[in-house]
Amino acid sequence: MKKRNRGFRLVAAAALTLASVAPVAGAPGTAQAAVPGVAKSYASLMYRSLTADATMAQLRATLAGQQADLKKRNAEAAKAQKASAAAQKRLATATAGHAAVHEKLKSAERALTDARNAVARQSKQRPRSNAAIARAKRAVTAATTVRDTRRTRLHQAAAELRAAKKLAGTTASAVAGALAATGRTTRAIAQTQNRIATAGTAAGYAAQAAAISRSVVAEVRPVFTIADTTNVYGTTVHRNVAYAFKRMVDDARADGVALSGGGFRTKERQIELRVINGCPDVWTAPASSCRVPTAIPGRSLHEIGLAVDVTSGGRTLTRKSKAFTWMTKNAAEYGFVNLPSEAWHWSITGG
C-alpha cells in the first residue's frame, strides 16, 4: 500500500472507535450476546495496530509542544528570578535607608532636647543674658526644623520599605509559580517520553492479534448471535473486526482499489449454498468436493461474521485481479488472511 495515501488518514483514524460503524439491522429486540474477552482483546489489538502510527505521531507532536513550552517556562522562570533579585536588592537598600533615616531622626531628637535644655539653663542664669537666651531659642527652632524634616523623611523611607517588601513578596511568588510550572512541564515531558519509549508497534500489535485469532473463533462461535454483527459499507461482519475491515476498505480505496464482498451469512444460508454448489452431502462432504468450495454448516467463519468473500467492482477476486494483489500485500495488516484454495475468501485465521 502507498504510505503517502495512508498517511493522510492516520490522525483521523486515531479518533475513530468501533462504535463508529453503523449497526446492521437485526431482529427487533435481539440482545447482543456477551462478547468473549479474547474477542475484545483481538479488537483492541487490531485498533492499536491500525492507529499505532497516528498515536506515535501524536505523542511526538505532544512532546515537541511540551519541549517548546518548557523553553518558554524556563525563560519565564529566569525573568522572574532576575526580577526577584532586583526586588531583593531594592528591599535591602530600602531597609538600610530606613534604618539610617531612623538613626538620623533619633540624633535630631537628641539635638532638640539638648537645645531645649540649653534654653532652660540660660533662663536660670544670673545675671540674665537675653542675647544668650535668644541664641538658645534660635537653636531650638533650628533643631525642631531638622527633627520635623527627618520625621517626614522617615515616613517616606517607611513607605519605600513597605513597597519594596511588597514587590519582593510578589516577585518571590512569581518565581515559585514559574518554577512550579517548569516542574510540571518537565514531569509531563518525562511521562510523554516514557509513553514513546514503551509504545507498541503496529506490527507488534498485529502479531499479538494474529496469535489469538483461533481462540477468538473458538470462543465466539458458541455464543454468537446476529446482534454481534454490524454493517460496513454493505458488508456484514462481526463487530470485533468491523473497525479493521472498514480501515482496509478505506485504505484500499485510497490506493485505487474498490473492495466489497459477502461477510456474515446464517447457517440456513450455508446449507442452501451447499445444496446449490452441489456438495455430495450437506453435512459431511468436505468443502473441496463442492463445485464451489463451501464449508460444512457450523464450521464456516462466515456464520460468525469473521470471514469475507471479497469482491472488487462487483466481481469475485481471482489471483490475477488487481484487488487480490493489493490484498496479498496488505490484508494481513488489517488481520485478514487468505484461504489458499479460494482467492476471494479472507478471514482472521485464513480458514
Image (tube, grey):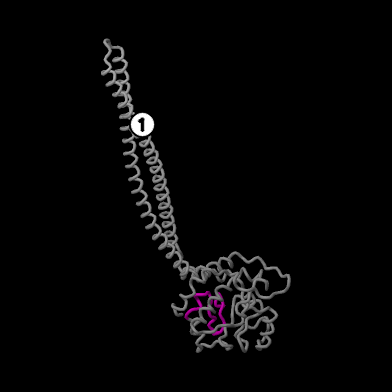
In percent of width and height, residue 97 lies at 31, 36
Report the residue at 35% width, 36% height from top: 157
304 and 289: which one is in front? 304
Report the residue at 72% width, 74% height from top: 27
Looking at the rendering, the stretch of residues picked out in magenta corresponds to 329-351
Report the residue at 30% width, 21% height from top: 137
Any magenta on residue 345? Answer: yes
- Quarter location, residue 88: top left
Q: What residue type is labelled 1?
A: Arg
In percent of width and height, residue 248 lies at 53, 77
98 and 259: which one is in front? 98
In percent of width and height, residue 172 lies at 39, 44
64 versus 172 height, above or below: below
107 and 289: which one is in front? 107
Report the residue at 41% width, 56% height from top: 190
Side (left or right) of 10 relative to 18? left
Residue under numbered circle 1: 151
Circle 1 SS class: helix
41 and 131: which one is in front? 131
How dense is the environment of label 1, judged by Cα within 10 Å: few (below 14), some, or many (20 and up)? Answer: some
Side (left or right) of 140 relative to 273? left
